């Protein structure tokens, strides 16, 4: 057939370079115009501000996969905050909202309601969201951003080693991670390793090869983490998200 393929319902873009210390990604999602099954959202160590056309809410941080049920034809606009920036942008420790979806008015009060009113009138919701974030003058925690980058890398160290690198005890590092990511460093490490495995899976000969490349001890280690974090076996996880 010569018909052009339908555009993907999900699209990501990078923010302007000046914003990348605070914003990791900009994204949009268009739900199908017919009733559809819930969408599974995998944990990724990040927090998103999401405008659904009616309300603005904060999603995450998620310690396990969550499901989102969307109205037919729903159009979401999202801003994914950069690692180490969400605590400053939102103005509270992230462990207070772990695994939740929270209306911005509940977090920011009247400024949140004013922002929602502006989004209702906006032709470009992303620009309005970015302006609101910049007006809060967030100061990202560079140590936490570094920690995230180290744990996300292909040669991620053990958490105990990373704590020594950062001049912290494991207990102290856990407290800081709970404040900035919503859970401890070991949970963040597991989440980022699973994301790394998904990124490796499509270019590896077998899922086990991808597991070893991502830092799992063996296939059983991958199966354990995949089921605990997503409720899915590795093969099904790749079919849905790979």
Image (tube, rainbow, N blue to C red):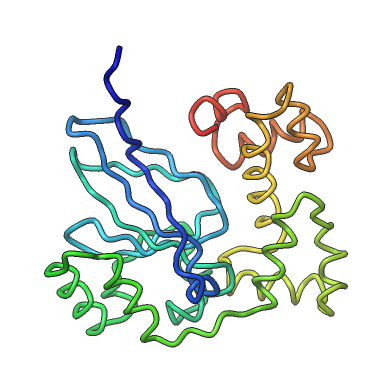
Q: Nearer the viewer, residue 90 or 199?
A: 199
Q: Position of residue 156 (x, y in %)?
A: 79, 55
Q: Is residue 46 above or below residue 112?
A: above
Q: Is residue 103 left or right of residue 26?
A: left
The structure residue drawn at horizontal position 44% and vertical position 78%, both measured from the top left corner, is 89
Q: Residue furthest top?
A: 1
Q: Position of residue 70 (x, y in %)?
A: 25, 43
Q: Is residue 235 above or below residue 144?
A: above
Q: How many marks?
A: 0
Find residue 137 and report its image quarter.
Answer: bottom left
The structure residue drawn at horizontal position 53% and vertical position 69%, both measured from the top left corner, is 95
Q: Is residue 196 left or right of residue 95?
A: right
The structure residue drawn at horizontal position 50% and vertical position 44%, both measured from the top left corner, is 42
Q: Is residue 220 left or right of residue 177?
A: right
Q: Residue furthest front?
A: 2
Find residue 147 and report its image quarter.
Answer: bottom right
Q: Is residue 236 above or below residue 48?
A: above
Q: Quadrant of the N terminus?
A: top left
The structure residue drawn at horizontal position 39% and vertical position 42%, both measured from the top left corner, is 67
Q: Residue furthest left?
A: 121
Q: Is residue 6 left or right of residue 144?
A: left
Q: Position of residue 80 (x, y in %)?
A: 45, 62
Q: Position of residue 120 (x, y in %)?
A: 14, 67
């Amino acid at each position: 057939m010569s018909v052009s393929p339908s555009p993907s319902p999900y699209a990501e873009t990078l923010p302007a370079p000046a914003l990348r210390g605070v914003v990791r990604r900009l994204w949009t999602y268009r739900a199908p115009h017919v009733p559809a099954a819930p969408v599974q959202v995998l944990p990724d160590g990040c927090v998103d501000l999401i405008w659904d056309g009616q309300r603005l809410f904060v999603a995450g941080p998620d310690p396990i996969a969550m499901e989102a049920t969307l109205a037919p034809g729903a159009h979401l606009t999202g801003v994914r905050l950069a690692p180490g920036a969400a605590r400053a942008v939102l103005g509270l420790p992230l462990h207070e909202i772990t695994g939740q979806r929270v209306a911005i008015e509940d977090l920011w009060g009247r400024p949140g309601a004013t922002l929602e009113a502006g989004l209702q009138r906006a032709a470009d919701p992303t620009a309005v969201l970015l302006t609101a974030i910049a007006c809060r003058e967030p100061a990202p925690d560079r140590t936490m951003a570094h920690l995230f980058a180290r744990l996300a890398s292909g040669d991620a160290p053990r958490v105990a080693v990373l704590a020594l690198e950062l001049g912290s005890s494991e207990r102290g590092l856990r407290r800081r991670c709970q404040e900035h990511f919503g859970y401890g460093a070991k949970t963040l490490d597991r989440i980022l390793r699973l994301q790394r495995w998904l990124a490796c899976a499509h270019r590896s000969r077998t899922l086990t090869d991808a597991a070893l490349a991502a830092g799992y001890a063996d296939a059983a280690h991958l199966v354990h983490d995949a089921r605990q974090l997503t409720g899915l076996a590795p093969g099904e996880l790749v079919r849905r998200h790979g």
